[in-house]
Image (spheres, rainbow, N blue to C red):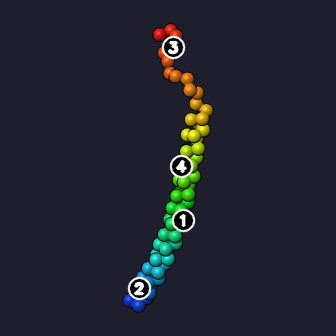
Amino acid sequence: MTTPDDRLTTLEIRAAEQEHTIEELSGQIAEQWKTIERMQKKLDALAERFLVLEEQTAPDTPVTKPPHW
């Protein structure tokens, strides 16, 4: 049979382990958020480069109706 002191000790151990786990997860989320922000900046830069290149290579021919119209 467990005594109230044993139960209290068990609960304190569990609480400490959970607190440690929460701190680890919080750190991992912070690192992942930094990675997401870096990737978003790179994506924005690549999208901008793509648009510039697309504008440079796009032909300047006007859109007209085909001859059979």
Q: Residue 4: x and y, percent?
A: 38, 89
Residue corresponding to mark 2: 7
Observer-nearest residue: 53 or 12? Answer: 53
Mark with earlier residue (4, 1): 1
Residue type pointed to by label 4: Asp
The three-letter amino acid code for the residue at tag 2 is Arg
Looking at the image, is mark 4 or mark 1 nearer the viewer?
4
Q: How far apart are labels 2 and 1 at the CA level? A: 36 Å
Q: Check contact, mark 4 vs mark 1: CB within 8 A.
A: no
- Give the residue pinned by disc 3: 66
Badge 3 amino acid: Pro
Mark identifier at residue 44? 4
For image coordinates 44% across by 87% down, the residue present is 9
Mark 3, other Cα within 10 Å: few <14 / some 14–19 / many ≥20: few
Residue at 53% across, 62% down: 34
Is the residue under label 1 in contact with that under label 2 (CB below 8 Å)?
Answer: no
- Disc 2 vs disc 1: which is toward the camera? 1
